[in-house]
Every structure is written in structure tokens, then in C-alpha cells.
Image (cartoon, rainbow, N blue to C red):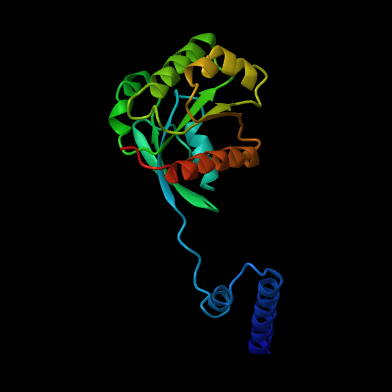
Amino acid sequence: MNLTKGLKDLLDELGLLWQYCLRDMSITPGFCFRALCCKGPPPPRPEYDLVCIGLTGSGKTSLLSQLCSESPENIVSTTGFSIKAVPFQNAILNVKELGGADNIRKYWSRYYQGSQGVIFVLDSASSEDDLETARNELHSALQHPQLCTLPFLILANHQDKPAARSVQEIKKYFELEPLARGKRWILKPCSLDDMEAVKDSFSLLINLLEERDFEPSRM
């Protein structure tokens, strides 16, 4: 019975594909034949190596752990660095997260080599002093020789807190428009309460990474 149902499902699928081929005259018979008879596994998802930076307490570890469906009870702040493979439908992001403590930030640049994109997480509800420090670190990253040509995803985290600044306030305070003009960057609000929005932000970053793949090589 199961064999008969499986065969029927396959015939139905082939029939729908054949009807589609007949309707679209731009599709060649050879394409239809390969689609019908040579259907193989889907191509592997591209992988991108990213670096994730931000001050301690910005929420880098929690966001990445949630994206990897890890238990929140096991989350501890990153003191050195950690690497997570974050899966998405159309790509896998190998994210190298760097600790954000004062004594670690001065070594960030040692881990930039080989990165294809940058994730910068900031606490939008932090103190004025910490926000100023985050601003300086982001400016430094945007101008670093190994990062300045890469796509940036800037996440204004902790938007669920009463003291959170809006994206417009962050953009103005961080002077992103004049500083990042000509660069590819995305600034999005986020919180752990809305992981779908976080995933959408990462999807936008993946789009930038894919666009970069198709750019002609510079001589």
C-alpha cells in the first residue's frame, strides 16, 4: 500500500512538472528531461565566515545561541572567542564570536583575517559611557583594513528594555550615514523576544554576502 502511494505521489509530481514545462515555451525539452529523469539532491548551501563583535553584555552570545536552537540555561558570556555554525535555509554562517571585555577588545583585530562579513551587536539600553565605547569600537571596525570592504550587520539589541534607544537615535549618535557612506551595512533593532526579526536581519546580511560573491574581481 505504501509503495503504491509513493509511486502515485511521484507520478503526480512528474505530471505537474511536465505541465509546467509545456506551458513555458522558453524551457527546452532537454531541461524538462533532466528535471524529470535526473533529479538529484539539492546543491550544498554556501558557507560564509563571519566575525561577531560587541561589548560584554550586548547580547552576542544569547542571540547566536538562540539562532542555533541551544538551551538558554547553558549560555555564558564569551571570554575569549567561540565559533558557531548558524544554519539558514540558503546558507550556513560560520560565526566567530569575540569576547567584549576591556582586556580582550585590543586583540580583536588578530581574529579578523579571513572574515567575509561582520556582525556588530550593541546594547541599545546601555549607559552613555558604554554606548560611547561601542561607538568607538564600531568606527574602528568600519575603518579597519581587513573589514572596511565587508558587509556589516549592526544589531541594536535589547529593544525590549524601557531605556532602549531607537534605531534612528542609534544611527544619528553613531554617525553611521557619513562614516559608512559607500559601504554595505544594515542597522536593525532586535531582541530575544522577536527572533523572527533577528532571522530576517541575518537574511538581509546573507543577501549582501551573495551579492559580493557575484562582484567581478578587482585587479
Residue 132 is left or right of residue 156, and the answer is left
Image quadrant where one finds the C terminus: top left
In the rendering, at what x and y percent does residue 64 appear?
50, 39
**From the viewer's perspective, is residue 160 above or below residue 50?**
above
**From the viewer's perspective, is residue 115 above or below residue 155?**
below
Residue 219 appears in the figure: yes
In the rendering, at what x and y percent does residue 4 appear?
67, 89
Residue reaching furthest to the top:
129
Residue 146 quadrant: top left
Residue 164 appears in the figure: no
- The residue shown at (55%, 53%) is 89
Residue reaching furthest to the front:
25
Towards the viewer: 88 or 16: 16
**From the viewer's perspective, is residue 9 above or below residue 132?**
below
Image quadrant where one finds the N terminus: bottom right
- The residue shown at (43%, 45%) is 213
Towards the viewer: 37 or 103: 37
In the rendering, at what x and y percent does residue 183 appear?
47, 27
- The residue shown at (30%, 35%) is 113
Number of on-image labels: 0
In the rendering, at what x and y percent does residue 118 appear?
44, 33
Towards the viewer: 151 or 31: 31
- The residue shown at (48%, 21%) is 180
